[in-house]
Amino acid sequence: MNLKELIENRYSVRTYLSKAVEDDKLNYILECARLAPSACNFQPWQFYVVAGADKKQEIIRSYEREWVKNAPVFVVVCADKSQSWERADGKNSSDIDASIAAQHICLAVAEQGLGTCWICNFKAEILSEALDLPKHIEPIAIFPIGYIDTEKGNAPEKKRKTLAKVTKWI
Ligand SMILES: Cc1cc2nc3c(=O)[nH]c(=O)nc-3n(C[C@H](O)[C@H](O)[C@H](O)COP(=O)(O)O)c2cc1C
C-alpha cells in the first residue's frame, strides 16, 4: 500500500474489539510519532500510553462517550510549551508540532491494521488532572487504539472538498 492508498483507507474508527493491542505494534506506532518533524527539531511532545483499567476510566471521564469505552489502550499526545519554538510574533509551535506527531500516530495505526480516532473535544482540565500534567504541558489529542469491530461499523464514504475548491495556483 502506498501513502495515498493508506490515506484513502484510513478513517475515524469508533468501534473497537476489546482484544489487546500487541506491544510491538504500539512501539511501532510510537516510533513513527517520535520521528515526526518539528520546528527547529525541538520535539516538544510527550506521549502517554494508558492501558490500565483505572487510569483509562479517568481518561474516559474527560470524554464520556460509549464508543471509547471498548478501546483497549489510549495514547494521549501532549505538547510541551516550554520546549517549543516561538516565531518572532509570539506564535508558539507546540500544538502544530504535536499535531504532526499525532497524525503520524493516526497513519501508523491504520498501517498496522488497527483503528483510531482523533479526539480533541475532551474536557482539558479533567484530562490534565488524570495525567498529572504541569501547566506547561497541554493535552492535544486522545487516540483510542484497537482492532476494528467491523461488525459494528465500517469505512464511511470519504467526504472532502474538491481540490479545486481548496487550492489556489497563483
Ligand atoms: C483535530 C481533530 C479533532 C477531532 N476531534 C474529534 C472528537 O473529539 N470526537 C470525534 O468523534 N471525532 C473527532 N475527530 C474526527 C473527525 O470528525 C474526522 O476526522 C472527520 O470527520 C473526517 O472523517 P475521517 O477521519 O473518517 O476521514 C477529530 C479530528 C481531528 C483532525
Image (tube, grey):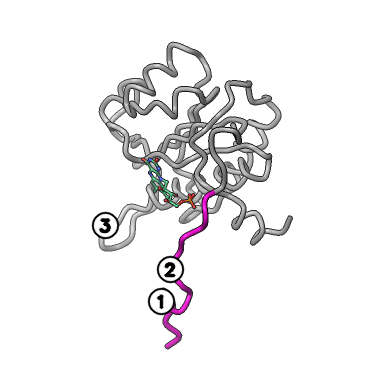
**Which mark, by number, is residue 146?**
none
**Which mark, by number, is residue 165?**
1
Pick the quarter of the image with the N terminus. Answer: bottom right
**Which mark, by number, is residue 161?**
2
Pick the quarter of the image with the C terminus. Answer: bottom left
Q: Could you tell me residue 30's position as x and y percent?
A: 60, 36
List the residue tagged with mark 3: 90
Q: Could you tell me residue 36's position as x and y percent?
A: 56, 49
Residue at disc 3, CB closer than 8 Å to ligand 1? no
Does 164 lie within the magenta span?
yes
Q: Could you tell me residue 84's position as x and y percent?
A: 39, 47
Q: Residues within 10 Å of mark 1 (few under 14, many from 20)?
A: few
Q: CA distance from mark 3 to mark 2?
A: 32 Å
Q: Secondary structure at mark 1?
A: helix
Secondary structure mostly seen in the magenta stretch: loop
Does 56 lie within the magenta span?
no
| Amino acid type, callout 1 | Lys
Q: Secondary structure at mark 2?
A: loop
Q: Residue at x 45, y 79 (%)?
A: 164
Q: Are marks 1 and 2 in contact (CB under 8 Å)?
A: yes
Q: Residue at x 55, y 44 (%)?
A: 106
